[in-house]
Image: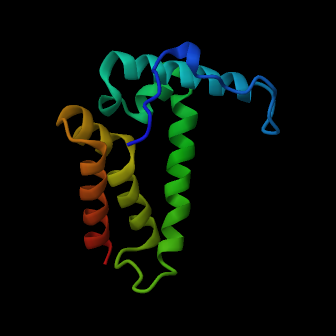
Amino acid sequence: MGKRRSLKADRIHAPEARTPDGPGVAQTRALILRQATELFAERGYGRVTVADIASAAGVAARATAAYRDALIAAAPHLHTLAPAPSRTVEETAGLLWFWFGPTGWRTLVVENGWSWDQAESVLCRTAIATLR
């Protein structure tokens, strides 16, 4: 196994310069990393969700919207594969959000104490079985 990194906030450094994404992106990234580090230290890595980190950093709405948009964009792609899902593209997008959105992860990992790997495995198998 690799060497473990310290969770001390002062050891995680975000880029100082502005990125091509626009002003403030580096500062937002640094804030997110600080909040994540604090939450991991408080609760343990397995009990912190992306939604928890985004909320603590004040970017929850944007992060959630971007993540949902990514899942919606994935749905039409799944319908180009063989076999295509048995549901409509809209239903596929909704099911992806149901399984892989923050509520599903929170329920399994935080509320039920599952590991991230266990949750991922079950959610993926459920998605594959249902979308066939």
The residue lying toward the viewer, choosing from 108 and 72, is: 108
The residue lying toward the viewer, choosing from 42 and 64, is: 42
Q: Is residue 32 visible?
A: yes
Taking the image as shown, residue 97 lies to the left or right of residue 57, namely left
Q: Position of residue 107 (x, y in %)?
A: 24, 39
Q: Residue reaching furthest bottom? A: 82
The quadrant of the image that shows the N terminus is top left
- Please report the residue visible at 55 percent of the width from the left and 25 percent of the height from the top: 33
Taking the image as shown, residue 70 lies to the left or right of residue 114, namely right
Taking the image as shown, residue 15 lies to the left or right of residue 39, namely right
The residue lying toward the viewer, choosing from 112 and 37, is: 37
Q: Is residue 58 visible?
A: no
The quadrant of the image that shows the C terminus is bottom left
Picture layout, residue 17 above or below residue 123? above
Q: Position of residue 19 (x, y in %)?
A: 80, 34
- Please report the residue visible at 54 percent of the width from the left and 19 percent of the height from the top: 34
- Please report the residue visible at 34 percent of the width from the left and 15 percent of the height from the top: 42
Q: Residue reaching furthest left? A: 112
Picture layout, residue 86 above or below residue 104? below
- Please report the residue visible at 72 percent of the width from the left and 29 percent of the height from the top: 25
Picture layout, residue 26 above or below residue 112? above
Taking the image as shown, residue 77 lies to the left or right of residue 130, namely right
